[in-house]
Image (spheres, coloured by chain):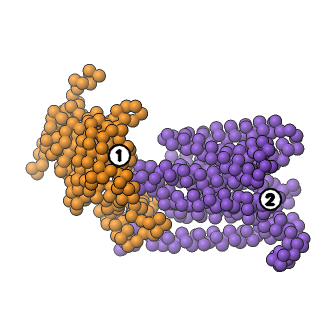
Chain colours: A purple, B orange
Amino acid sequence: MNPATTAIPAESRSRYRFLVALLTALLLAMTALSVAVGYAELDLGAAFSDWLAGRATLPALVLVELRLPRALLGALVGFSLGLAGAAMQGLLRNPLAEPGLLGISSAAAFGAVVVFYSGFAGAFLLALPLGGIAGAMLATLLLYALNGRGAGTMALILAGVAINSFAGAMTSLALNLAPNPYAALEIVFWLMGSLADRSMAHVWLVLPLMLLGWALLLSSATALDGLTLGEDTARSLGFDLGWLRARLIGGAALAVGASVAVTGAIGFVGLVVPHLLRPLVGHRPGRLLLVSGLGGAILTLAADTALRLMPIRPELKLGVVTALIGAPFLFSLIQRMRRAA
Amino acid sequence: MQIEARDIAVSLSGKPVLRGIDLSLRAGEMVGLIGPNGAGKTTLLRVLADLLPADAGSLRYDGLIAKALGRRTLAQRIAFLAQGGTVHWQLRAGAVVALGRLPHRRPFADLGPSDHAAITRAMAAADVSAFAGRTLDSLSGGERMRVLLARALAVEAQMLLADEPLAGLDPLHQLEAMALLRRTARAGAGVVVVLHDLSLAGRFCDRLVLLDQGRVLADGTPGAVLEDANLARAFGVEVARGEHHGQPYVLPWRPIRREDETAS
């Protein structure tokens, strides 16, 4: 056998391309399905032709005001959560790292709630996502400071528990002090995580922030590969770890903070998706990024479409559904890690 | 490549680890770094690889400071093999060795023919070609160490700094790894290797540097460094000596009480 062909399997890169193409196709199909499924009867063909012709008919309005924003936000938020999960796992070199589990999502939710109550939300449009991003950034920095001192998995998870409960307590405090019970109820429902009743304005609001976050995260792919062999080796391979951390923390905070600010906390996507896809990319943390983004978008859209097809009314909140799927998954993951250790 | 360290001092968490280190390293030479646990061997290696800034002293690579040389150039010229052999994700052995080519690649570019050639050479040299397609968790500790050694060789750097590359290797692969490092030096690269086996250090290295309590206790030919007085002072052991096929070997025999130990 020629050793040149055995060192790096030649099919590895074409397999990766095939996986990306497959997931992209699945994502497009899932987006189309999400647009097609809804409560109101909708003739999609008529809706599209009316919309393109600029006629403000009822089908066109349902499409543009209800269906499209929901599908697009599902894809954007899912991509953000899957990508941020894979990136955090690469940075912390820990398969349990996930924005929700580590308290990043709940800190983002708290940041958004603060903005909501302080009245800034009415002052300018970007206040809410910026509040979410600030909360996410703070939590990520805190996690990194704790984990950077050589702490292991246990310390990381405990730090996440601490951040989660602190952010949760502060959010509860805000609800406790809410001026009227109706506002408090609204916040509670928002916190559960949902894609329902969002508009295109929400899409345009978060899109640039998310794109910036994605760019920061995806540009770290090669450095995350280098980090596989530890921080010293990564630096000896020419990577600037300070800059890498800044990019990943900033990128995760932008993507997750913006997601939480418009849809509330949708947990476990960043945990489940990278875990399922990791074997398909040969466990390479760099290649895991893009496919986890695509996978996260597919999973989020699938869950959101499924809950609209379920005969349960009022419809279940998306965050509740992902938690119901994700929590047992986390149990089995911990079980498997314990057996491996 | 030449590395010149002058009067290097390093403290970690307030405790002095290295003091007044003067060291010159040059291409084509195989240097063994020996000394007891806690003598500062790993710290010195990290300082030499520009992974840890020295608190005092000067460090020059071919006459230039690291900043002037640039991160990427330094990464191409100095390969660093970390202690412990940590691999955080279960990559295939071939993919691990390919990481050694990262300093030579443009961002997002694929491996080129020269990268593939370097990877193949490194894997053959470290005797791990057969493992290329296997994931690291399916390999034994010693096999994994050899894959990591191949990773460092794949950089094809002018200077290789290896921290305990023999840890976990069986006798055959210890001998083979030492022979491989010496071949690497003969081919023109500078090699600095942290070792605990005094006989292997004496047999395979051109020069030994003995560290004790953060200082260079002895620096010279193996014969001069591995003297009874030096070994007694640094390690606190008495050694047995012998000769096989005309080559000397040194065997730690029994502990001896050190005077400065009772004083402190």
Residue on which the image places disc 1 = B46
Q: Residues within 10 Å of mark 2 (few under 14, many from 20)?
A: some
Left or right: B235 as drawn, with respect to A181: left
**Position of residue A285 in the picture relative to residue B35 (left or right):** right
Task: Give the residue drawn at x 87%, y 55%.
Answer: A314
Pointer 1 indicates a residue of which chain? B
In this picture, is A45 found above or below B240? below
Neighbourhood count class around disc 1 (C-alpha, 10 Å): few under 14, some 14–19, many 20 upward = many
- Residue B113 vertical position relative to residue A78 in the rendered view, above or below: below
Question: Is A10 drawn above or below residue A255 in the view shown?
Answer: below
Quick one: which residue is furthest to the left in this view?
B246
What kind of residue is marked 1? Arg
The image position of residue A244, as x and y in percent, is 51, 53
Residue ID for mark 2:
A198
Numbered disc 2: what chain? A
Residue at the (64%, 53%) spot, across then down: A254
Q: Which residue type carries mark 2?
A: Arg
